[in-house]
């Protein structure tokens, strides 16, 4: 796939994730997909390996933000099989707290499917929003 096709695959997949369409998002991922979130926040940080683990994580987004999560993509950079996406997520957490955080994702595509996701985010902002 071209860089442009990879960028389209990634942005379509991201919109499905934040839109609560886990199955549509997972259809664009390799069976061996991995999603890494550096940090030490239990239940969020760490490595999710395989579609089942990623599906469980995506489901947690809906629980954390019952009214939905608004995602605004500011930049997409694609080079070969790597797509970097900068975005801002906003919403109201299940705690009732307003949430706004900046993200940078690195997606790697293999064989027309997303194989690896690395997520970089301010974990303190996440923790504060998720703590009652």
Image (cartoon, rainbow, N blue to C red):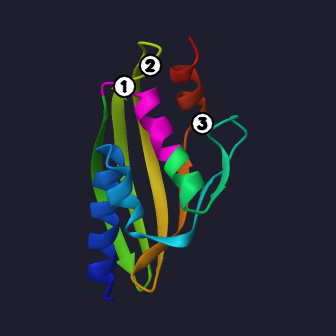
**Quadrant location, the N terminus:** bottom left
**How much space separates mark 2 and mark 1, taking CA atoms?**
6 Å
**Residue at numbered disc 1:** 66
69 in the magenta segment: no
Reading the chain from its start, which is encountered first: label 3 or label 2? Answer: 2
Which image quadrant for residue 18?
A: top left
Which image quadrant for residue 9?
A: bottom left
Q: Secondary structure at mark 1?
A: loop
User: In the rendered view, does 72 fall on the left or right side of 111?
Assistant: left
**Could you tell me which residue is drawn at 34 percent across and 32 percent down?**
90
**Could you tell me which residue is drawn at 36 percent across and 76 percent down?**
78
**Residue at numbered disc 2:** 94
Q: Which dot, 3 or 2, sits closer to the camera?
A: 2
Q: Secondary structure at mark 3?
A: helix
Which image quadrant for residue 43?
A: top right
Please give the label number shown on residue 123.
3
User: In the rendered picture of this protein, how many numbered marks are placed on residues?
Assistant: 3
101 is higher (above) or lower (below) than 3 = above
Q: Which residues are magenta?
A: 57-67
Q: Main secondary structure of the magenta part?
A: helix
Reading the chain from its start, which is encountered first: label 2 or label 1? Answer: 1
Instruction: Give the x, y percent position of residue 88.
Output: 35, 42
Instruction: Give the x, y percent position of residue 24.
Output: 32, 59
């Amino acid at each position: 796939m071209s860089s442009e096709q990879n960028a389209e695959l990634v942005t379509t997949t991201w919109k499905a994730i934040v839109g609560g369409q886990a199955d549509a998002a997972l259809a664009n991922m390799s069976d061996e997909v991995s999603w890494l979130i550096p940090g030490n926040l239990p239940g969020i940080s760490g490595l999710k390996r395989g579609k089942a683990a990623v599906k469980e994580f995506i489901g947690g987004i809906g629980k954390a933000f019952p009214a939905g999560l608004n995602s605004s993509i500011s930049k997409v950079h694609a080079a070969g099989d790597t797509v970097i996406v900068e975005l801002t997520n906003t919403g109201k957490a299940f705690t009732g707290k307003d949430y706004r955080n900046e993200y940078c994702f690195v997606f790697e595509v293999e064989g027309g499917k997303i194989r690896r996701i690395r997520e970089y985010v301010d974990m303190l902002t996440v923790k504060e929003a998720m703590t009652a």
